[in-house]
Amino acid sequence: MTARQRLSVVMIVKNEAAMLPDCLESVSWADEIIVLNSGSQDRTADIARLAGAKVFHAEAWVGFGKQRQRAQHYASGDMILMIDADERVTPDLRASIEAVLAQPPSSTVYSLNRSNLFLGRFMRHSGWYPDRVMRLYPCALNYNDSPVHELLDAQDAPVVRLPGDLQHLTCRDLIVFQQKQLAYAATWAQERHQRGKRCGLFSVFYHMLGAFVKTLLLRAGFLDGKQGWILAVVNAQYTFNKYSALWALNHAADKGPL
């Protein structure tokens, strides 16, 4: 009889004292929980330790992809479940993961069905559901180096969809959410600029309008009610911030030092 595979839940956190308890409770059944704390100023580390997690520290921020690599370095499980403090594993998803752990080891990667909260509503359209993310995978794999919007480097492994939802409390406060998006946009623009990517002024508005139409119409955001309309505007704003920041960096480089 094949022994059950061990599961390591891996997290990167910073100042997540408010969100962490419920997240840790939802994965308390895992064989180990690895928390990489990135300079928190609140009780994040203490809360994680009290919940039985193994807490490590990395003060220097190297971007999301490399930070996830750092965190996974401490894991000893056969399978990795990478989650964030604002996510919760539902009972149905737990049952699906437990079924995977009972199977013999393989190279298979599992994508999870993420259910995103936006201003009090779990969205069912707008491109926010089912929002498949590859988060359960063999320990031999890892994330890429991308500083933002990082992805698992699946190395052509087969990908299987798991039943059950991973709840993501994405946007509880619109201003805080937009502040995060502004930071993501700046990082995105810097990374693209360093790679020599160009962006014309027309492209800025083309992509912005495209994001609005895609969210509201092509992805049926209007079926999500008021939140769907607001999200379409927010996505358009985020896209404008990304491309206008890239345009500004290109423009400044073309002009040279003042």
Image (tube, helix red, strand yellow):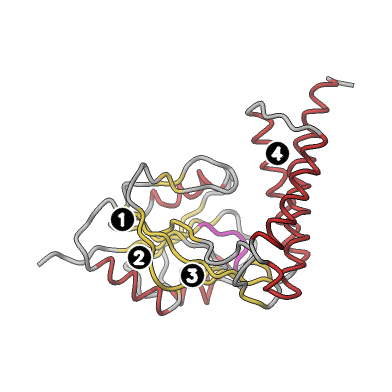
Under circle 4, the secondary element is: helix
**Where is residue 250 drawn, in percent x and y?**
77, 28
For the residue marked with disc 2, what is the amino acid?
Glu
Where is mark 4, residue-wise?
Answer: 189
Q: Are marks 3 and 4 in contact (CB under 8 Å)?
A: no
Q: Residues within 10 Å of mark 3 (few under 14, many from 20)?
A: many
Q: Residues within 10 Å of mark 2 (few under 14, many from 20)?
A: many
For the residue marked with disc 3, what is the amino acid?
Leu
Q: Are marks 1 and 2 in contact (CB under 8 Å)?
A: yes
For the residue marked with disc 4, what is the amino acid?
Ala
Where is mark 3, residue-wise?
Answer: 166
Where is mark 1, residue-wise?
Answer: 76
Quarter-wise, where is residue 190 in the image? top right
Under circle 3, the secondary element is: strand
In terms of sequence position, does the residue under pointer 4 or pointer 2 come before the other?
Answer: 2
In terms of sequence position, does the residue under pointer 3 or pointer 4 come before the other?
Answer: 3
